[in-house]
């Protein structure tokens, strides 16, 4: 006898038993429902980033290892670049963390330039460095949103020696420029001793031996150790002024 027949005969039908949390987790499509709501969180991160950057003006992003310490050559290089960029009128953007990022923010702030930090929430609780302007710190949960911000608002990438994260941002920029998804901007690797073999491998293996890339795919990539020449490269790349990349 079903519930309808019981009701017709005057039986009392107990209310349906609610799902347990375990049963809810097994319902088909449950994970997609959660993803649907997550879209609003993603939108909020984009809006926050766009609003923060809307008035910044020309900017250059400096990447590099979180593991370098004050006094290291890479730290000093990052600080020097931050100073020169600020003196030239560029805002300095970093990933907001310690090491080379801290150095570049520190240099920019010491010269009165805009010091921007795109921090990321990580399991090891990366903390933003203390040289970011208080109103120019944006903390992201999603790496892909953070990458959009770097690429959208940078007139150049300066890539100091670093690890997987630094390499990821470097290759991301090269790919998007090569495929036309971003305007061309200079990607400058500082540290010939560190990056020289990598660039040589790209030129030899990808270009010369296999033809997987074109010669023009390298015309926006530079290796330069002199901070003053890095500034010259950036300025000469924009004879008609600056614009947002996409």
Image: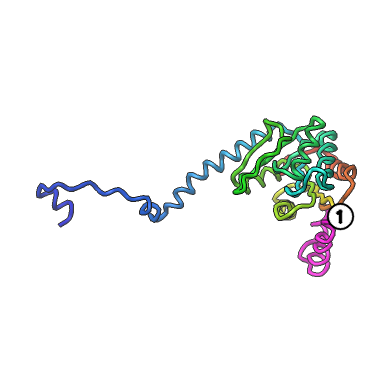
| Crowd rating for badge 1 (residues with CA inside 10 Å; few <14, some 14–19, many 20+) | some
Q: Which of 191 and 103 is in front in this view?
A: 103
| Residue 215, quarter of picture | bottom right
**Is 207 left or right of 38, judged from the image as shown?**
right
Q: Residue furthest left?
A: 9
Report the residue at 80% width, 30% height from top.
112
Quadrant location of the C terminus in the rendered image = top right
**Residue 216, position in %: x, y?**
82, 57
* Residue segment shown in magenta: 192-219
Quadrant location of the N terminus in the rendered image = bottom left
**Residue 227, position in %: x, y?**
88, 44
Q: Which residue lies furthest to the bottom in this view?
A: 209
**Is 179 left or right of 74, judged from the image as shown?**
left
**Is 33 left or right of 242, judged from the image as shown?**
left
Q: Name the residue under label 1.
A: 192
Q: Nearer the viewer, residue 126 or 96?
A: 126
User: Compared to 1, does 60 lie above or below?
Assistant: above
Report the residue at 59% width, 44% height from top.
141
Q: Does the magenta run of residues contain 213?
A: yes
Report the residue at 63% width, 40% height from top.
139
Secondary element under disc 1, as helix, strand or loop, is helix
**Residue 142, position in %: x, y?**
60, 46
**Residue 144, position in %: x, y?**
63, 48
| Residue 146, quarter of picture | top right
Report the residue at 67% width, 30% height from top.
135
């Amino acid at each position: 006898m079903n519930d309808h027949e019981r009701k017709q005969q005057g039986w009392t039908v107990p209310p349906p038993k609610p799902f347990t949390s375990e049963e809810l987790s097994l319902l088909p499509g449950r994970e997609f429902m959660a993803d649907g709501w997550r879209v609003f969180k993603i939108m909020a991160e984009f809006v926050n980033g766009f609003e923060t950057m809307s008035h910044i003006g020309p900017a250059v992003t400096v990447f590099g290892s979180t593991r370098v310490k004050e006094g290291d050559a890479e730290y000093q290089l990052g600080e020097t670049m931050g100073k020169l960029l600020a003196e030239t009128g560029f805002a300095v953007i970093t990933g907001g963390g310690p090491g080379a990022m801290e150095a570049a923010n520190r240099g920019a702030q010491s010269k009165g330039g805009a010091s921007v930090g795109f921090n990321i929430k990580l399991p090891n609780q990366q903390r933003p460095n203390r040289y970011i302007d208080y109103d120019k710190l944006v903390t992201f949960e999603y790496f892909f949103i953070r990458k959009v911000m770097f690429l959208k608002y940078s007139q150049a990438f300066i890539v100091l020696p670093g690890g997987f994260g630094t390499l990821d941002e470097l290759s991301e920029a090269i790919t998007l420029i090569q495929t036309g998804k971003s305007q061309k901007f200079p990607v400058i690797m500082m540290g010939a001793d560190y990056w020289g073999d990598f660039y040589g491998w790209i030129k030899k293996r990808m270009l010369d031996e296999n033809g997987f890339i074109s010669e023009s795919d390298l015309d926006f990539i530079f290796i330069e150790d002199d901070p003053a020449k890095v500034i010259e490269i950036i300025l000469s790349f924009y004879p008609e002024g600056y614009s947002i990349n996409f």
